[in-house]
Image (cartoon, helix red, strand yellow):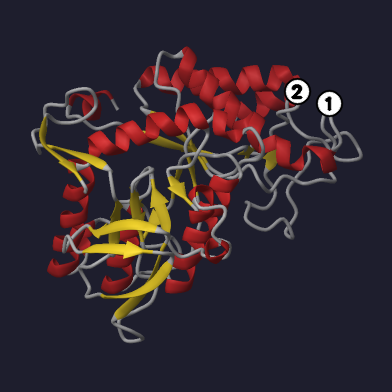
Amino acid sequence: MAKLKEQGFHTSLWQYNFIPPNPENTNYIEAVKNGFLAKNEKGEPYRLPEECKGSWVNDAVIDFSNPKAREWYGEKIYSLIKMGAGAIKTDFGEGIPEDAVYQNIDGRHFHNFYSLLYNQTVFNASKAAGKENIVWARSGTAGSQRCPVHWGGDSQCSFEALAGTLRGALSLGLSGIPFFSHDIGGFLGTPSDELYIRWAQLGLFSSHSRCHGVGNTSHREPWEFSKEACDIFRFYDKLRYSLMPYIYKEAEKCTESGLPMMRALYFEYPDDRNVYHIDDEYLFGDGILIAPVLAPLSKSDTRSVYLPAGVWFDFFTKEKIESHGMWIKRRVDLKTMPMYVKEGTELEYCSEDKTLINGYGEIVKKEIWA
């Protein structure tokens, strides 16, 4: 990790909240000796049964209701951060057994709260080690906005899963969590070039972007797909980074207000009854409306987009549209993801210079859309 760090890489380590009951596993031996594991009716370490989906059968469960267990686990994480890890991916957390016996709370009441304590323990350990306060969290509940960032878990590689990912993002935003990410391309399976492109367009206009898939043969790096897919990925990647001044400013607003970066239209237009059930487009911060393409071109080469009342500009064609709250049809090709800028929005663009200034490159252009 130290060598990687010298080359500019920041290593994220994968972690989960269970312990394999291997007699040679020193972590398991310590946890049993000190009573840091959830127990069964007989007072023995609880073992995950076959019907506990999404987890490894027979593993033991760390009891985060026990403050000493949290302290012990936090020390383990702290040592990894000190070794040079940049961040910890806190996988799982949502599937703990309700019939297990925990030290300080009934399992039925602990089920949701568990994920918050799990992520908080890692978050605090990272802070204590002098690192940025961040985790890469799969699970959460009320209060989890205090331990960012969350991602959407293991989605299928399908257009249906892509649409579901966006619905999940908007739902999470309505629940008070400002920042959200997901696996570009989907996790389970192998995406087609078209699906990968559409997912990348959405992913690069989420608060955080991540390319990740299952196993060692199902790659998600853009250069593993066609030249066209890689070129389109590069186009939106560069567009995202050129807009970093806007993204940083909007993220700061979200931190202060609790508003999400990916914002359901209802947030800004609560009096417009048309937006109540729109779950396939969103505001990216205050000023940009994103309408990702969620179906293959073989079904349609147009995208219906709802524009709330006001003046909007097509980001790519600069067309000005005066809307009283109306649907429009936008023709799309593989490269196009419809984006509209609200009148009066100021966009600053930074250079591609790798020398970062205040979190982004030197500002080289400023636009006020009017």
**Residue at the image position 22 percent from the left and 42 percent from the top:** 243
Q: Please give left or right for residue 352 compared with residue 76 in the image.
A: left
Question: Does dot 1 land on a helix, a strand or a loop?
Answer: loop
Q: Observer-nearest residue: 152 or 57?
A: 152
Rendered location of residue 308, percent (x, y): 43, 60
Other-residue count near label 1 (Cα within 10 Å), few / some / many at <14 / 14–19 / ≥20: few
Other-residue count near label 2 (Cα within 10 Å), few / some / many at <14 / 14–19 / ≥20: some
Q: Please give left or right for residue 123 compared with residue 202 in the image.
A: right
In the image, residue 9 sits, relative to residue 233, either above or below, namely: above
The image quadrant where one finds the N terminus is top left
Q: Are marks 2 and 1 in contact (CB under 8 Å)?
A: yes
- Kindly report the distance in space between the C-alpha atoms of the residues bearing marks 2 and 1: 7 Å
Q: Amino acid at mark 1?
A: Asn
Rendered location of residue 182, percent (x, y): 43, 52
Q: Observer-nearest residue: 30 or 108?
A: 108
Q: Which mark is residue 104?
A: 1
In the image, residue 186 sits, relative to residue 242, either above or below, namely: below
Q: Amino acid at mark 2?
A: Asn
Q: Which mark is residue 66?
A: 2
Rendered location of residue 292, percent (x, y): 35, 64
